[in-house]
Amino acid sequence: MPHLHRPHPATAKRPLALSAFLAASLAVASSAGATAAPAQAAGVVPQTTTTTTYAAPNPEPVYGTEAAALLETIPVKGRAPKTGYDRSQFGSAWLDVDGNGCDTRNDMLNRDLTDIAYVTSVPCTVASGTLADPYTATSIAFLRGMGTSDAVQIDHVVALSDAWQKGAQQLTYEQRVALANDPLNLQSTDGPTNEQKGDGDAATWLPPNSAFRCAYVARQVSVKATYSLWVTQAEHDAIAGILAQCPGQLAPTDQPDPSAPQAPAPAPALPTVTPGSYCSTAGAQGVSSTGVLYTCKTSATDTRLRWRQ
């Protein structure tokens, strides 16, 4: 039950004084707000904007994490019922979640294809290109259009239906949208091969190109760890068996390599100076309003510091 505030006895005896005070206050407010009232009366409502954030529940693995070790941190459980699954639970297909002006499908085509041509001068919608398909180890020509676009499809490395049955039901809608559009979980591939995979996990489907299987299951491990998904026992054993064939296989991640040399900090911008004016620090540099470089220095005939070329 909500807590009710009861007036203090001393204030409860002053209803008339309070009424008079409120009446006076309302009169002043009415007079002071006379200029503001028309805008409100006209139905002008302040506009507010909200930004939706699509993000995974966890950061991607630390750089250098071995996929086999990461696999052992993922819970092993039975598959949950598929009840309630629908593609819309993961948002509309191919949104622009990163706000770069290009939908996720075209982002992936831009990442994975070569010899790209665009529909317009804007480098977004891919009209044609060539895919070196890692799933089949074949080269596939992509041509945008009815009956041809499906030659190259975008695979969810961890299928959305599989994710739904292994923990995605507990994610927020925004986290599921992030999963469906995360480049870590997306790979351009041969259309028929993608359709053959369906919603299979590593226990029921692997890429025909055996040379890519280690990288493929390592990505599944990274995705499942990043999105708090689990694996079935059969899936765990299948992944572990593949990773045993490639000891040291790293889990893909967007985390930086701590041993990589750091880019130097950008030099501070030079101040804008007036040519010929006095300055105080010999050797300091500045630029004029027209972009010409000047140095604070003396001259052969003038020992005073000025901005000079």
Image (spheres, rainbow, N blue to C red):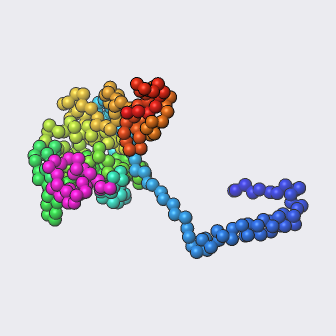
- Give the magenta-colored segment's residue range: 101-128
Q: Is residue 108 magenta?
A: yes
Asked if the magenta segment contains residue 298, the reply would be: no
- Which residue occupies 86% across, 57% down? 11
Q: Relative to 288, does residue 299 appear above or below in the rendering?
A: above
Q: Residue at x 26, y 37 (%)?
A: 218
Q: Can residue 205 be seen here? A: yes
Quarter of the picture containing the C terminus is top left
Residue 102 position, x and y percent, is 30, 55
Instruction: Where is residue 238? Give x, y as percent.
Output: 23, 38
Which quadrant holds residue 91?
bottom left
Q: Is residue 36 above or below residue 1?
A: below
Q: Nearer the viewer, residue 88 or 42?
A: 42
Image coordinates for residue 69, horizontal then vertical, percent: 31, 30
Residue at position x 55%, y 67% from top?
45
Compared with residue 306, is residue 160 higher up or lower down, i.e. above or below? below
Q: Nearer the viewer, residue 71 or 122?
A: 122
Is residue 229 left or right of 250 when viewed as pictured?
Answer: right
The residue that appears at 89% across and 61% down in the rendered structure is 13
22 to the left or right of 284: right
- Picture quadrant where residue 270 is located: top left
Asked if one can make out residue 233 in the rendered structure from this viewpoint, the answer is: no
**Which quadrant is the N terminus positioned in?**
bottom right
Q: Nearer the viewer, residue 62 or 31?
A: 31
